[in-house]
Image (cartoon, rainbow, N blue to C red):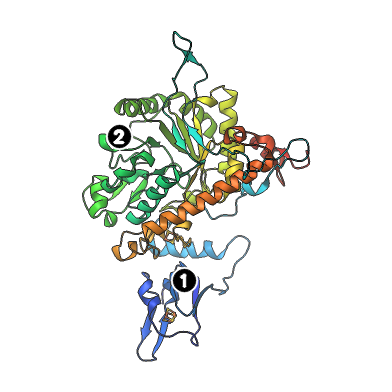
Amino acid sequence: MPMDYVYPEYEVVRNLSRCINCRVCEQQCANQVHAFDPKTGQMTADDAKCVNCHRCVAMCPTHALKIVKSDHAFKENGNWSAQTITEVYRQASSGGVLLSSMGNPKQYPVYWDKLLINASQVTNPSIDPLREPMETKTFLGKKRVSIKRDAQGNITPNLPPQLELSMPMLFSAMSYGSISYNAHASLARAAQQLGIYYNTGEGGLHEDFYQYGKNTIVQVASGRFGVHKDYLEAGAAIEIKMGQGAKPGIGGHLPGAKIVGDISKTRMIPEGSDAISPAPHHDIYSIEDLRQLVYSLKEATEYQKPVIVKIAAVHNVAAIASGIARSGADIIAIDGFRGGTGAAPTRIRDNVGIPIELALAAVDARLREEGIRDEVSIIAGGSIRSSSDIVKAIALGADAVYIGTAALLALGCHLCRSCHGGKCNWGIATQRPELVKRLDPDVGAQRLVHLLSAWNNEIKEMMGGMGINSIEALRGNRLMLRGVGLTDKELEILGVLHAGE
Ligand code: SF4
Ligand code: SF4
């Protein structure tokens, strides 16, 4: 028995009166938790291998299974939680950096839940979105304030390239490699059907997905994987990834074992070689350097595509955003510290960065103060969980939001937080063909369309309740928000009044 043996985190509970020994759970579990014991004629389970992904629970035809959190008692106290103790054991055993998947799970304040939305009463009538026009169409890009006219006095169009969204939502960057071909296909098809955009992440664009180019944002990250002229031209916009909310200041690493077949081809790196994105872009050490890349990308695409610069929400995010707005970028994407990831060092994910709510409010206020808010649009991301989070984000200054984890949940993710293992039983964060095929891209796309359409209808209802009939009128309208249980400093940064004021 190893020195650091600890009782498994989860227990598989099998109701033997219901189990028919069909072995479906055994076939469905890539973690090899279940097995049939011919001696006893019964199924057995190795609890230590269970990641609590619910695949067996969902597939069991007789509802014989449930997974419970082990109630095995650690000698915990206020300082040493069971998780902290277990992590010390793991590192003492492996000598390695702890890795995690999905967003920061720690109990930091969730400001969305401390903000309340206004509703009209009596003097300012509400609007019924079923009977009156309600506009959720959104345009992202620079909005020039000057109007030019030709010799006849007609207005000459001089608006820089814009992204047109039927609703104020886009799918977050998720690379082919970190998620499966079928997950990518689901996002691409849904974006096309909804009239919005999905994002390649830093993995390049598989040739099969060029057909969705009008609904694709192509990303240029520090590793420059899969970046070439056709790739840049294929997308509707180009995103320079400077940072990611789940791992600010950290690059990316897709192990060589996952660089096989189409993934190697799409990333343009040899099979079996690690895909390491450096922490910084090695040609960017100032806003002037960033400006050079922004204009290089614009030049390469004949000034036809908006350029997005994505940053992680960190302490000086407002100053960074001000520089980005002056770099010539058209859109700033801010990723909060609860944003998801396929893999990140646990300590970075859980301790670095700031909440998106505070970062977004600070950036919007700074750009307004400097008179450059219309130079850029703002996309906010990193734990947008519902339509009410979106309404609050827009009222805090966002033009639109990135949806990541919620999109994966719609595809079947059960938040087991084991993506880095590459054995996602739901066919999402895996490249194993037998697992990938479990996700039908048509079904996946349909579920994404359902989710975002439902959210869009809810946004219309909430806007109608406020007596507002367009996203434009809601953007930065902090009078529509009130805080509860917040300190004066938090209210000051958010720029909202306390409930009752
Ligand atoms: S899937 Fe359900 S019924 Fe079939 S062997 Fe597993 S527990 Fe038993
Ligand atoms: S994508 Fe798959 S592996 Fe990752 S958290 Fe969701 S269910 Fe688990």
Question: How far, Cα to Cα, is label 2 from label 1?
Answer: 42 Å
Residue at the location (42% across, 42% down)?
197
Please indicate, yes or no, whether residue 440 appears anywhere in the rendered image: yes
Residue at the location (39% across, 91% down)?
40
Above or below residue 326? Residue 393 is below
Disc 2 and disc 1 in contact, CB within 8 angstroms: no
Residue at the location (49% across, 78% down)?
63
* Residue type of the residue flagged with mark 1: Ala
Viewed as shown, does residue 298 lie left or right of 320?
A: left
Residue 48, quarter of picture: bottom left
Rendered image: mark on residue 83: none
Please indicate, yes or no, whether residue 228 appears anywhere in the rendered image: no
Above or below residue 396? Residue 253 is below
How far from the left and from the top, in percent, is residue 274? 28, 50
Outermost residue on the left side: it is 270
How far from the left and from the top, in percent, is residue 8? 48, 73
Rendered image: mark on residue 58: 1
Reading the image, the residue beneath label 2 is 233
In the rendered image, the quadrant that contains the C terminus is top right
Badge 2 or badge 1: first in the primary sequence: 1
Q: Residues within 10 Å of mark 1 (few under 14, many from 20)?
A: few
> Regarding mark 1 in the picture, which secondary structure is present there?
helix
